[in-house]
Image (spheres, rainbow, N blue to C red):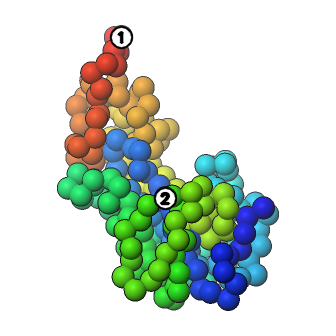
Amino acid sequence: MLLPYMEPGRVEAGCDEAGRGCLAGAVFAAAVILPPDFQNEDLNDSKQLSEKKRYALRPVIEQEALAWAVGIVSPEEIDRINILNASFLAMHRAVEQLAIQPQHLLIDGNRFNPYPDIPHTTVIKGDGKFMSIAAASILAKTYRDDYMNRLAEEYPDYHWMENKGYPTRAHRIAIRQKGITPYHRKTFTLLPEQLEFPF
């Protein structure tokens, strides 16, 4: 059972990211402030939900949240500042777009770069513990999937419609055969030498 908040009466924004382990594409993050009486029995960590369920929940979250926003950090920025800092920056960009300023941030994970003037708490596997983080995980995941599906139309050889930029076998074979795109993260290990691809 997910908890509605960490501290009663406090305006909390849950934050989560999507796409950190990908070889290509931007990293996305969302920040969500839910009303304290929000209830939805389907809400859960986005990784535990089917794609259909995630997309069904997205409009519910957007309509019922007190505030929500999505932040994006490009592949070029990821290469410049590293993926961990990029994930935090995406969360910062989401928080700064919120129509309501939260009093506290609930961050999925165990590390975070503090956001100016708003205290935070990191929560390991927070998307399976707090509703606001779970809601943020769903928005981040679905908005990033939409983005990768658009890129897949531009670069169909990399199977991004299926792998969303993650390092699947098909994705890496395509990198070996076709080279990289402008959306690939050049500081990532795109082709580990130990991987042998039979052709």
Spot occupied by residue 150 in the image (x, y as percentages of width and height): 40, 51
Spot occupied by residue 165 in the image (x, y as percentages of width and height): 40, 42
Give the vertical position of 23 relative to 106 (above or below): above
- Which residue: 22% across, 43% down? 186
Residue 117 visible here? yes
Spot the residue most to the top. Answer: 198
Local secondary structure at mark 2: loop
- Which residue: 41% across, 50% down? 20
Q: Which residue is mark 1?
A: 198
- Which residue: 70% across, 84% down? 8
- Closer to the camera in the image, 160 or 21: 21
Residue type for callout 1: Pro
Give the vertical position of 184 relative to 199 (above or below): below
The quarter holding residue 177 reads: top left
Q: Which residue is mark 2?
A: 110
| Label 2 vs label 1, nearer the camera | 2
Give the vertical position of 169 relative to 153 (above or below): above
Q: Which mark is residue 16?
A: none
Check the picture and name the quadrant holding the N terminus. bottom right
Q: Cα distance, mark 2 to mark 1?
A: 39 Å
Question: In the figure, is residue 177 to the left or right of 162?
Answer: left
Local secondary structure at mark 1: loop
Spot occupied by residue 27 in the image (x, y as percentages of width and height): 38, 56
Check the picture and name the quadrant holding the C terminus. top left
Spot occupied by residue 167 in the image (x, y as percentages of width and height): 40, 34
